[in-house]
Amino acid sequence: MKRICLLFITIFALSCLLYWPLREEAAEAAKLQKVSESAKHQKKSCTACHPDFTPVLPKEHVEVKGRNITACLDCHPPDTTAKPEPNPFSSRIHRAHFGPKEKLDCTVCHIWIPGKTFSLMGQKPSIGGPSRGDMTLLKNIFSSWSDSPYLDSLHGRKNVTCDGCHGKMLPKAEDAVDNERCLECHGPLEKLVAQTTPKDFPDRNPHKSHLGEIGCAVCHHGHGASSVYCLNCHGNFKMKIAGQS
């Protein structure tokens, strides 16, 4: 029995001797990867494409001194409250750099460590930890937001960015926008009903349905073609909706 105990103790001791160096090595590798990712971000700057900012700024704009997005943040601080309202600075800078003519890499302005953090340079708060797959999806959505016939792009042209609908955290594939968020801009509901009551057939108001309150997203699809739910039953109705494609 003593020999068996000694054998187990010896195996345990050897396991510890092997485990701790490997653990320290893994921690050091992770640290080096993080430093490497940060170094990549630091090398990128706006001046690579804009050695002189004057041509791309309004005539009355103050002189911009700096190499990256941090030069803008003193006058254009990010809205950490993510209120459902237009954000002209964020909208214009994203549309200019991720529109139909340009697909700038996000890490020129953002710090991204896959699966861990995503933040704006010079800002501590992280707004998510998207994986590489998540980032591919987000880039596709941003492309649609920048230039598509859908509701996302209609909002983009009015300077409404992702956080205007989704809040301050990066949206995920399964996220949805609830009615309350939509009505903060388009409501209250009574006002919306009054605005959309047809003159010829006042009882055919999609915002005052005989089905009761239904989700806005049933008809209004942010990143795809919208469709009028009523027409599934009432095919003879003539009803149009923004973002149909």
Image (cartoon, rainbow, N blue to C red):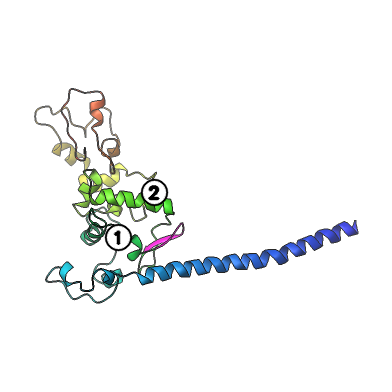
- The secondary structure that most of the magenta stretch takes on is strand
Q: Residue 96's x, y, as percent?
A: 22, 59
Q: Quadrant of residue 81?
A: bottom left
Name the amino acid type tagged 2.
Lys
Say whether residue 135 is left or right of residue 187.
right
Res 101 seen here: yes
**Image quadrant occupied by the N terminus:** bottom right
SS for tag 1?
loop
Q: Residue 157's x, y, as percent?
A: 19, 52
Q: Quadrant of residue 49?
A: bottom left
Name the amino acid type tagged 1.
Leu
At 20% from the left edge and 47% from the top edge, which residue is drawn?
154
Q: Is residue 224 above or below residue 43?
A: above
Tell me the CA gap for discs 1 and 2.
21 Å
Q: Is residue 164 above or below residue 232?
A: below
Q: Is residue 117 magenta?
A: yes
In this orientation, which residue lies closer to the viewer: 86 or 47?
47
Q: Which residue is mark 2?
A: 172
Q: Residue 136's x, y, as percent?
A: 38, 51
In this orientation, which residue lies closer to the viewer: 137 or 169?
137
Q: Is residue 62 magenta?
A: no
- Magenta range is 112-119
At 21% from the left edge and 32% from the top edge, which residue is drawn?
206
Q: Which mark is residue 104?
A: 1
Q: Residue 72's x, y, as percent?
A: 26, 70
Q: Is residue 121 above or below residue 234?
A: below
Say whether residue 2 is left or right of residue 51.
right
SS for tag 2?
loop
